[in-house]
Amino acid sequence: MKSTTLWTPHAGITNTNTSGFAGLPAGYRYYNGTFDVIGYYGIFWSSTENFTNNAWYRSLSYSSSDAYRNNYNKAYGYSVRCVRD
């Protein structure tokens, strides 16, 4: 099991990482180069576009055990996960 120590603690949520996915809470980079929510969210781009300027992403939160899916502008800097074939 991978470490969960970089995640910000939240009352009532135990970060156990039972899935084995070691996504870290890197937050994101705004289009202007500043960073936000480091330690609170891990947001990962999908390879699937949604229109020309947007793409799908998945996000993990320090305060929930759910994974969320949405789309946003590709000018923002989210994390990527590389998978070897």
Image (tube, helix red, strand yellow):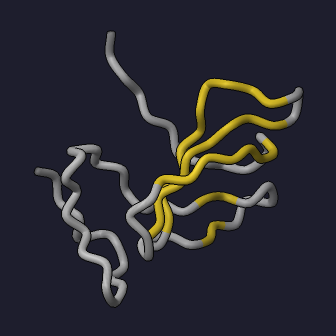
Front residue of 61/74: it is 61
Residue sitting farthest toward the top:
85
Tell me where residue 46 appears, x and y as whole percent: 59, 32
As drawn, 17 above or below 82: below
**Residue at screen point 66% across, 49% down:** 77
Front residue of 42/28: it is 42
Residue sitting farthest toward the right:
52
Place residue 45 in its image quadrant: top right
Q: In this view, does 69 lie to the left or right of 26?
A: right
Tell me where residue 7 appears, x and y as whole percent: 34, 71
Q: Is residue 53 left or right of residue 47?
A: right
Front residue of 46/31: it is 46
Tell me where residue 68 appears, x and y as whole percent: 56, 53
Residue sitting farthest toward the left:
1
As drawn, 28 above or below 81: below
Tell me where residue 40 appears, x and y as whole percent: 47, 72
**Residue at screen point 48% across, 53% down:** 67
Q: Is residue 54 left or right of residue 69?
A: right
Question: Count the marks: how many?
Answer: 0
As drawn, 71 above or below 11: above
**Residue at screen point 33% across, 9% down:** 85
Q: Is residue 5 left or right of residue 63?
A: left
**Residue at screen point 31% across, 86% down:** 12
